[in-house]
Image (cartoon, rainbow, N blue to C red):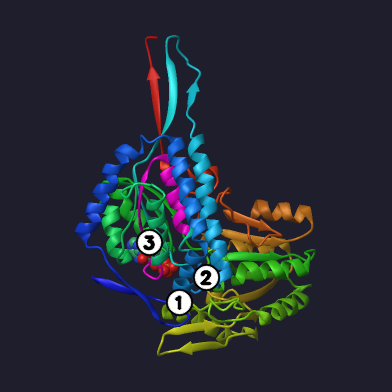
Amino acid sequence: MINTFQVKNPATGKNMSTVTCNSPEEIKQCLQKGHDAFKTWKKTTAHKRSHLLLKWSNLIQKHKMDIAKIITEENGKPLAESISEVDYATSYIDWYAEEAKRIYGRVIPTHDEGKRLIVSKHPIGLVAAITPWNFPAAMMTRKAAPALATGCTFIIKPAEETPLTTIRLIELAHEAGIPADVIQFVNGEGKSVGEIFTGSDLIRKITFTGSTPVGKSLIKASADTVKSVTMELGGHAPVIITKDADIDMAVTQTIITKFRNAGQTCVCANRIIVHESIINEFSRKLVDKAKQLVVGNGLDKNTDIGPIINEVSYKKIVHHINDAIEKGATVLTGANYEVDNENKTFFIHPTVLTDVTDNMKIMYEETFGPVVPLITFKELDEAIEIANNTPYGLAAYFFTNNYKVGNYLFDNLDYGIIGWNDGAPSAAHVPFGGMKESGLGREGGIEGIEPYLETKYLSIGNL
Ligand code: ADP
């Protein structure tokens, strides 16, 4: 087991910080504190919790530029994207600060004279979160805000690549007046901390965003203590461009959904399925725009695409590109790399591949990089079959100006999030989550608070 780890800037390889891992004993002490704090936090009024959440959100906004810089330095994404992420992160806190005041129960009409039947909602208990490196601020607040809003206490283990954003956000939560034991972080390796979390009967819920294999292991390990789980796992998003699409808009939106965060998001486009009659125009316009994207350090104001997070991810992306080329794909642009082996920095230029076939890894494994594979279709049902032919079901996109085609696609795509002429459907007030092996439960919207609540039913007799 490691005792410390280094947080490196993926654009320069420079060490930003050496983080000490918490020992198992320390983690267990934190769990005990979180469990004990639950007894008082759950009794804090919803209005007070709401007020504290808003104070937290305001403090984050006050320090927005500093936090955005931390995000860019530890994650690599362009500063403008980090600034948007901070706004996105506080939008969850703002939304759940309001929802805290709307956790209603109900009175059920009785079947029996002299009875009163009452349903009320209660916080589930201590919640443990494990988060990924690709949205270090938003993935944290999307879980912490509804947990705290309901009266749950919260402990998080951030990704080893990006713990500094989480640490800063939690400092600000404490500064806002949220008690220290109500929201805590611990650091360490995923597997060892995960085992302590899942093995503890003080934790009543695990909320996780990350890869499908890790999510499956957390679900299995949570079974022993019958914990509630919310899982936001991998994706393999299809984008269908029909013959009646507005091609310019489809190109612009595809660029947004594909290249944000250098293609390292679980909802980013993985397979672009284009009607054969428009493939030439679409690919030409897409390549023109992709070529204009500037690759570099996210702190440079012209940068559109930052570095790849680490060597393992970089090698996987290159492997997918090479596998596709070996199996017959044609490179329309990209497939060129800037690598500094001494400092371990890895940049990939936006890459567009055509002549892609479904036996290529890029078509069924998550690539998590700035690569666009283009495949054509003739009939709409063929496009739907390609789109649904995956164990994943997180996000799907389609572009059409024909409302019947759009409605048919919406009905038939097995995905939890669907963008119709929209490459950026996420928001704090809407449900985010996947079907099939992309996850369990939803975050965001009115759906996102339910997983932190228990239902209690009271039957009063003899009235
Ligand atoms: P990615 O490939 O995007 O890094 P992971 O699922 O490996 O996705 O990581 C997401 C989060 O899960 C990180 O915080 C990581 O430390 C944590 N993690 C990794 N392996 C495990 C595990 N076996 N149990 C619990 N958490 C884990």
What are the residue bounds of the magenta stretch? 139-163
Task: Work out how far the residue at label 2 is from the one at label 1, CA to CA, in angstroms.
Answer: 9 Å
Task: Return the x and y of residue 431 as percentages of the image width and height.
Answer: 56, 49
**C-beta proximity under 8 Å, tags 2 and 1:** yes
Task: Return the x and y of residue 360 as percentages of the image width and height.
Answer: 55, 77
Quarter of the image for the C terminus: give it. top left
139 to the left or right of 237:
left
Label 1 SS = helix
Q: Is residue 67 magenta?
A: no
- Give the residue type that dot 1 points to: Ser
Q: Which residue is mark 2?
A: 264
- Mark 3 within 8 Å of ligand 1, using the beta carbon: no
**Quadrant position of ligand 1:** bottom left
Q: Could you classify mark 3 by the number of other residues whose Cα lies within 10 Å: few (under 14), some (14-19), or many (20 or more)?
A: some
Label 3 SS = helix
Task: Return the x and y of residue 220 as percentages of the image width and height.
Answer: 34, 55
Q: Which residue is mark 3?
A: 167
Number of the label disc, if any, that sits on residue 313: 1
- Give the residue type that dot 3 points to: Ile
Q: Is residue 321 above or below residue 156?
A: below
Q: Is residue 418 above or below residue 120?
A: below
- Mark 1 within 8 Å of ligand 1, using the beta carbon: yes
Q: Could you classify mark 1 by the number of other residues whose Cα lies within 10 Å: few (under 14), some (14-19), or many (20 or more)?
A: some
Q: Earlier in the sequence, mark 1 or mark 3?
A: 3
Inspect this view and state whether residue 313 appears. Answer: yes
Q: Could you classify mark 2 by the number of other residues whose Cα lies within 10 Å: few (under 14), some (14-19), or many (20 or more)?
A: many
115 to the left or right of 381:
left
Task: Work out how far the residue at label 1 is from the one at label 3, CA to CA, in angstroms.
Answer: 24 Å
Task: Return the x and y of residue 42 as percentages of the image width and height.
Answer: 36, 37
